[in-house]
Amino acid sequence: MYWKNYTSLPKQFRNERVFDGCGISGYMNIDGKRENGKKIIDMITILNDRENGLGAGFAAYGIYPEHHDCYALHFLFDDEPSKSNVLDYLMDVGFIVQSEAIPTKIPPNVDNPPITWRTFFHPQEKKNLSEDEQVLQIVMNINENFEGAFVMSSGKNMGVFKGNGWSHEIAEFYKIQEYKANMWLAHSRFPTNTPGWWGGAHPFNLLNTCVVHNGEITSYGTNKRYLESFGYKCTLHTDTEVIAYLFDLLCRKHEMPIEISSIALAPPLFKEIERFEKNYKIALKNIRATYRSAMLNGPFSIVVGLANPIPTMIGLTDRKKLRPLVIGVSEDDNTIYMSSEEASFRRLMLDPNINFALKEVWHPKSGTAIVATMGRGLSRNGLEKPLEKIELTIEGDN
Amino acid sequence: MIENNIVKINAAPNNRPLSYKKLNKQIHNMINFKHKKILLDDVCGQRFIAASLQGNLEIEINGLPGNDLGIFLDGPKIVINGNCEDQAGNTMNDGEIIVHGEGGDVIGLSARGGKIYIKKDVGYRVGIHIKEYENKFPVIVIGGTTKDFLGEYMAGGLIIVLGLKFLPDGKIIENPHTICGDELGTGIHRGKIILRTEEDLEDKLGIGAKVDKMTSETEKEIRPYIEEFCQTFEIPLEMLFEKPFKVIKPISKRPFGGNYIGTII
């Protein structure tokens, strides 16, 4: 692990480049049963050929049921003064319900590890600003203006644990095995276009949205300018951050259904759209035109976790399928697995202590979302056409 | 452990998968001891298995081999009892890869010889830039269906897609999905793609490809491979000739020549 650059990245490293690809994994229990982190650690560490020790992380949903109505803010601090600065600021803008260190296991030879901290927080009541919007502004403010402090995650009843190291090191450092979650996402990083540092590790989070990503977003500049016009601030020197903010913008702020949001991010080519029936043609063209600047270009496969209003896991690849994604469903239909490689599932089969069997494993179509919702199961399997199973009515002349 | 002249290697001793380097080293050790048949058990995503191996060898794999299986392979036969991942047969020169399951994306990337037989479906970009030269002739046969970019930039060799579906109870039926995705044979400039289908493929063609009718000459050319495929995976041969075959051919030897020198194509 790299015991430096916890909360900000020195200027001289901001243009470093190395080349290869990352590993992503995730699973969700449809019935909401919480499981410890052993399975997700196995799933991500088997993909160690996809990482180079420059970042890894885990996102866990449903880990703080005793504080489920508070925003769980996960922090990294460089030192005590920056910590008390941020906590003072939080007390000014809201109420801290509980504030404690995130338990870690620090290797004995490290002399200046980061301070890992979590705070259960309530913003003040304001008439014209929703709680979510307030927390969003607080997070953006801390990440932009507070030296020596970095917000890893800011959702309710969930948390992100990430750092600069190999996935097995990060799992051990944060004691991932001890958390119990109903949805897990994991990432092991092989940074290509941006340097490895603690804040640049995945998952990227904003409120309840978490994203793990393999690939690169070549439309980063366009997406960033688009997001900035809605008040988001991209401060983390990594392309994946725009995906997290785009999901927050489309799914939370604009209240778009996930199926439509995923089309906005990875729309079909105009050539393909021409082959659809009239209603679908109009709808697809309108989505593409309206969210032209939200479209993600470049190779990517992502797994996204959302929690509002119901926990949802989404898998999506780019339109030309330049990055891998495999889906598996457990024999009792209760668990949906996603991963970069089928090896993640195979690894769980090797374990004699868990009773693991898959009913089906498949490769989704490119640019097609896989959506699994807690309590409802798999609503889209990634093999449908865009807008299939969705009824459309067109209003006005087109 | 040796049974029936087959030496067995456990790729996950104590349920902990070996790294690909250690696994390949064990395979090399066994080859140094002049073993000709090797069985790998509990393979779990290790990459580069059997990389650059040469000569008369047989490797059987139980489990899931990782990316770049049989990369630069030059002669051996690899049989996989299950699925394989992406880039199997990457730049292979000679030999056979037989998969009793599904294949991932980019199978047979830049292969310049040898045979790859996959029983079920495969993913995107299968057979990208495979090429032939003198007596080197790569052949890829897919039992199921493929996705987009089949035979992209193909420079020789043969790809055959049969469009079958294998049910869990052993029955074989026609695959209900479309046989291939879009951009079929984009940039193809030599070689042939044979698809067993009645679908209209004109919409799916990529730049530089055209649909042609099956001739008796081509049928004669592909028949030995189809027969071998059917024998390997126990498919009744007569069933395959119930549907017509379509041939995808290049329209030119230099589909992108016009991009560089005026109007010549």
Image (cartoon, coloured by chain):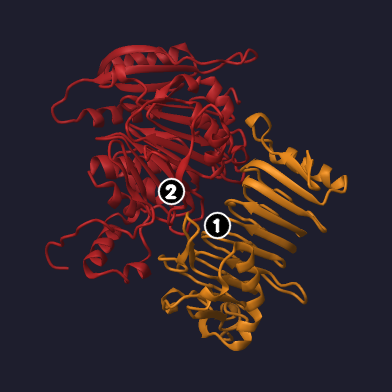
Chain colours: A red, B orange
Task: Determine if residue A91 is in view.
Answer: yes
Relative image position of residue A121 (x, y in whole percent): 29, 18
Q: Is residue A249 above or below residue A119?
A: below
Residue in the image at 41% along x and 49% along y: A316
Label 1 SS? loop
Q: Nearer the viewer, residue A122 or B61?
A: B61
Q: Is residue A101 above or below residue A347?
A: above
Name the residue that disc number 1 marks.
B105
Q: Tag 1: Cα neighbours inside 10 Å, few (<14), some, or many (≥20)?
A: many
Amino acid type shown at disc 2:
Tyr
Relative image position of residue B142 (x, y in whole percent): 56, 65
Q: Are the residues tagged 2 and 1 within 8 Å (C-beta)?
A: no
Amino acid type shown at disc 1:
Asp
- For the N terminus of chain A, the image quarter is top right
Name the residue that disc number 2 marks.
A220
Label 2 SS? helix
Residue in the image at 39% along x and 40% along y: A304
